[in-house]
Amino acid sequence: MSVSLPSGGIRAKTPAGRWVLLATVLGSGMAMLDSTVVNVALPSIGRSFDTSLAALQWTVNAYTLTLAGLILLGGALGDRYGRRRVFVIGVAWFALASLLCGIAPNVETLIAARALQGIGGALLTPGSLAIIQATFHADDRARAVGTWSGLGGVASAIGPFLGGWLVDAVSWRWVFLINLPLAVVTIVVALRSVPETFDPQPRGRFDVSGAALAALALAGVTWALVEAQGNPTSAALAGAAGVVAGVAFVVVEKRSREPMLPLDIFRIRLFTSVNVVTLFVYGALGAFMLLLVLELQTVAGYSAQEAGLALLPVTVVMLLLSARSGDLARRIGPRWQLSVGPLVCAGGLLTLLRVGPHASYVADVLPGVVVFGLGLAVLVAPLTATVLASVDVGRAGIASGVNNAAARAAGLLAVAGLPALVGLSGDGYRDPGVVDTGFDRALWICAALLVVGSAVAWFTVPSRALAATEPDVPDGRAAPCVRVGCDMAGPPLDPGHERVQGGVTGRERPAP
């Protein structure tokens, strides 16, 4: 169905603008829901299939692996073949994979279906924000992005609660099946109301080999970390293969005329520094989110719904404070917030050492969760803004894509490696004593990662890193949107700054 784009773009307060926002929020919200509800369902999945912790790790990691490896390629496909088209394909793909997850007869099928879900997520996730940037009038884009971010945060907030309720009231399978009606509505609205847009100046070929090598490298290292204790020989071979694929990826990207990841971007010290901070912060976050749910359900005796609700204050705090945090970073610079935020998060984690058998939510869980949420609110918006400010406008899309992929890869590797490091393996996730001891050890390790991230930020991020984003400093760098959503799996994607040309929009190309 053809939908025309008005000259200059769609206005936010018109019915057309609301329909576009509905489609993009539903699509991205579906992916956000999936990233938050699955952890709550893991103990129930383990009991249903009588499976090991390694299989549960792969239930999480299979999705993150394909998403992290292919998300940059997904954005490029939308630019070339149509952002609406690729977005709709991604939503349909995600829904079909969700159906396969919901009817999976065994854990192996579930893991394979989760990997397919990640492919769908890689197609729809960059497309949702790219559609907003490409279709809305320049004067209304900030408002539209803010609405998209806020409603996406609501999706993240209700995800754990909804997932826990579905697990307790019906079955863990409905955590995945709930995506089907959401996908149908999203596709119908997108086809009826979202204009198609393209990059008017597509260049070169897609770097499929680079994307494949990146995914293989992550898969090999992840396999090695998960299987390190149970099957050392297999782990060593997988790790070696992952390293080889990683080296090959670097060689291919260096020699490619149109690389998926231009390696010269890492010559920018600020960009590299902030991505290192991202690795430490989101590695700690990914492992913590997995193990807290196990601790609450296995040790403290919480239901799935109660465990899901336990994290609600984190999202609420981020929704209330993230925009203010971004504004503060523009006034005082990001250095203090990127240094203090991880330390506050670490303090929140160590407060949760009090959680144990029959833990009181108000006395033992809530204080640590609130402090942790405050730390995230302090650091997430400045982190995203600094990544975008570190590069010129023409590279804003690739910069945010790399940062998002780094965050997801960090969570992937932490979820793969940390459980075995703290003594959780095999069927140990069912033993309250083993889980409690492992959880305490993991909190100390995650806190240490956050402290290292804080130190990297303090010594490498200048106080005036965001100075060029002020309107009176036109040095060509990206002016970041600091109204971020609350998808704790990774920073939001910014597809770059768009310009409208004859009814279609394309990325600004860097000045020669």
Image (cartoon, rainbow, N blue to C red):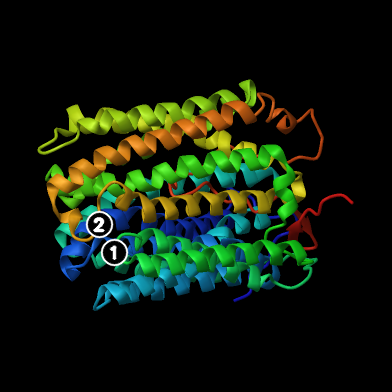
227 relative to 277, above or below: below
Is 396 on the left or on the right of 85, as rendered? right
Seen at 22% across and 53% down, the residue is 164
Query: Where is mark 2, residue-wise?
Result: 425
Closer to the camera, 207 or 21? Answer: 207
For the N terminus, the quadrant is bottom right
Residue beneath the point at 43% across and 55% down: 412
Query: Residue 140 lies in what quarter of the image?
Result: top right
Say left or right for 433 vs 256. Answer: left
Provide residue 428's location: percent of width, then percent of height.
Answer: 19, 55
Quadrant of the rendered image containing residue 78: bottom right
Q: Residues within 10 Å of mark 2 (few under 14, many from 20)?
A: many
Q: Secondary structure at mark 1?
A: loop
Look at the picture and state if 147 lies above or below 30. above
- Is residue 194 visible to us here? no
According to the picture, the residue beneath numbered tag 1 turns out to be 230
The amino acid type found where label 1 is placed reads Gly
* Badge 2 amino acid: Ser
Element assignment for label 2 = loop
Q: Are marks 2 and 1 in contact (CB under 8 Å)?
A: yes
**Residue 355 visible to an observer of this rendering:** yes
Q: Residue furthest front?
A: 233
Residue ID at (63%, 25%)? 333
464 or 87: nearer the eye?
A: 464
Q: Is residue 311 left or right of residue 342?
A: left
